[in-house]
Amino acid sequence: MAALTSTNLHSTLELIARGKVRDIYSLDESTLLFVATDRISAYDVVMKNGIKDKGKILTQISKFWFNLLSDICKNHFITTEIDSLPENVYPYSDQLKDRSMLVRKYTILPIEAIVRGYLTGSAWKEYQSKGTVHGIKIREGMQESEAFDCPIYTPSTKAELGKHDENIHPSEAVKIVGEKYAKRIEELSLALYSRARDFATSKGIIIADTKFEFGVDENGQVVLVDEVLTPDSSRFWRADTYKLGQSQDSYDKQFLRNWLTANNLAYKEDVEMPDSIAKQTSEKYVEAFESLTGENWTI
């Protein structure tokens, strides 16, 4: 089966949103169906073609982390079992199996909670020019890909599809979601990252940075939502090839970003990846799944 870049359930469920990767359907007032397609985005732009089975890998990695981190923070995950869905969607199981996730519906807090353990990407560029990361003063003399003394919380705005997220200082997050929620998001983000970082280290993976998203339940409790610690939302580096002072061998879509940058295609619309780039990106995602979970990718 070719890469699945869009779903069509023929109105059996209400389609309420198409994100960069996920198609989101409503089951009832309190439950949503997330379907991870094989779409891939870089620099906030979705590529014309997809990565075969990428959505399945993202779903299984998210399921793995939701279960592993559930003692730190309540999350929206219910199940990935297709038998839990209404019978009227069974005819579309080829679009849903292994890539769909039933989740609880919560009110979303409109910031992206980024945690950085290492100086890389846009943070490295800002540090080189200003000595700061998201406006936070960082000690002098750091090198590219160097670990921070402690992980730092660096939120961004949550942009609508087609627009770009904006890096902000943590104090700006307070203005967006209020002091109570901003503080709790920061606490949870750092705790989740630290646990995941330590686990990944034991598997030979460095989690350089990652992005979390949160919602609020009916009691005002902050809840982990969306995907979690996937190659789409994180930078995963190979620990055995890590070298200070340079960019790193990555398991994530940094491979695609590098190709776009090298070909002056960053931020441009209607870009189609060559088959070789799609294949190599797919191999990176599979390797990330197998390294983290210790399981062979057989789905």
Image (tube, rainbow, N blue to C red):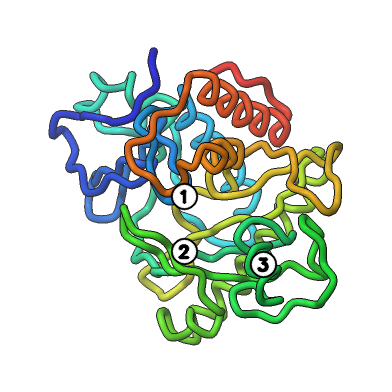
Identify the mark nearer the N-term, 1 or 2: 1
Q: Are marks 3 and 2 in contact (CB under 8 Å)?
A: no
Residue bearing mark 3 = 190
Relative to 222, 96 lies left or right: left
Q: Residues within 10 Å of mark 3 (few under 14, many from 20)?
A: many
Identify the mark nearer the N-term, 3 or 1: 1
As drawn, the residue found furthest toward the top would be 1
Q: Where is residue 82 in the image (x, y as percent from the top left)?
A: 38, 28
Relative to 178, 8 lies left or right: left
Q: Height in image: 104 above or below 141?
A: above
Q: Height in image: 29 above or below 232?
A: below
Q: Residue drawn at (56%, 79%), measured in percent from left and top?
A: 170
Q: Where is residue 233 in the image (x, y as percent from the top left)?
A: 54, 49
Q: Where is residue 113 in the image (x, y as percent from the top left)?
A: 54, 66
Label 3, label 2: how far apart the Cα atoms are = 13 Å
Q: Residue 43 carries which label?
A: 1
Q: Nearer the viewer, mark 1 or mark 2?
A: 1
Q: Which amino acid does label 1 sit on?
A: Tyr
Label 1, label 2: how far apart the Cα atoms are = 22 Å
Q: Nearer the viewer, mark 3 or mark 1?
A: 1
Give 164 or 1, whichever is nearer the viewer: 164
Q: Which amino acid does label 3 sit on?
A: Leu
Q: What residue type is labelled 2?
A: Phe
Quarter of image, res 111 = bottom left
Number of numbered discs present? 3
Give 201 or 240, whichever is nearer the viewer: 240
Residue bearing mark 2 = 214
Identify the mark nearer the N-term, 3 or 2: 3
Quadrant in the picture for the N terminus: top left
